[in-house]
Amino acid sequence: MSPRLLILDDDDAIVALLRRYFDGLGWQVHACSGVPDGFRVVESRTFDVVICDLNLGPEQGGDALSLVTHVRERCPAAAVVLFTAAAGDGVRAAALRAGADEVISKPAPLAHLRDAAVRAMKSR
């Protein structure tokens, strides 16, 4: 069975790139661009992995840590990988406290993101 993946990022180019990459690996991919959409999707579907940008613009619902917490409550078995340009130690610690399994710094090779997602799924 192929992994079910939710991608949440406010950059359409990144969403398209990740969608093509993971589709090519045979994953079932769903994408959305804002925290409110992410909340709605997580309420209606289950995912094996959520890959989420941490810093979404205010027009997209803002910081994604609340979504990470919601995923943990709604889908505790889902792996959560934050993919962010702001991955300093403080950000990483806050993300892990909120329930993220992995934090990957942008830019990163897509294979690193895939490996982080697979590791996180195996640890769940």
Image (spheres, rainbow, N blue to C red):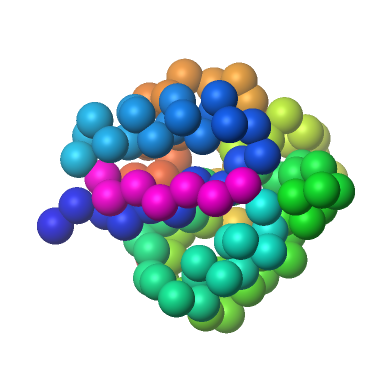
Badge count: 0
Q: Is residue 91 above or below residue 79?
A: above
Between 88 and 61, the one lying in front of the other is 61
Q: Is residue 53 above or below residue 1?
A: above
x 40%, y 71%: residue = 45
Coordinates of residue 82 in the picture (x, y in percent): 60, 45
- Residue 83 shown left or right of residue 77 in the figure: right
In the rendered image, the quadrant that contains the C terminus is bottom left
Q: Is residue 104 visible?
A: yes
Does 118 appear in magenta? no
x 46%, y 30%: residue = 16
Coordinates of residue 64 in the picture (x, y in percent): 72, 55
Between 74 and 36, the one lying in front of the other is 36
Between 97 and 24, the one lying in front of the other is 24
Q: Which residues are the magenta region?
A: 27-33
In the rendered image, the quadrant that contains the N terminus is bottom left
Coordinates of residue 101 in the picture (x, y in percent): 54, 55
Coordinates of residue 83 in the picture (x, y in percent): 60, 38
Q: Is residue 76 above or below residue 22?
A: below
Between 12 and 26, the one lying in front of the other is 12
Q: Is residue 68 visible?
A: no
x 50%, y 70%: residue = 42
Does 32 appear in magenta? yes
Give the prevailing secondary structure in the magenta stretch: strand
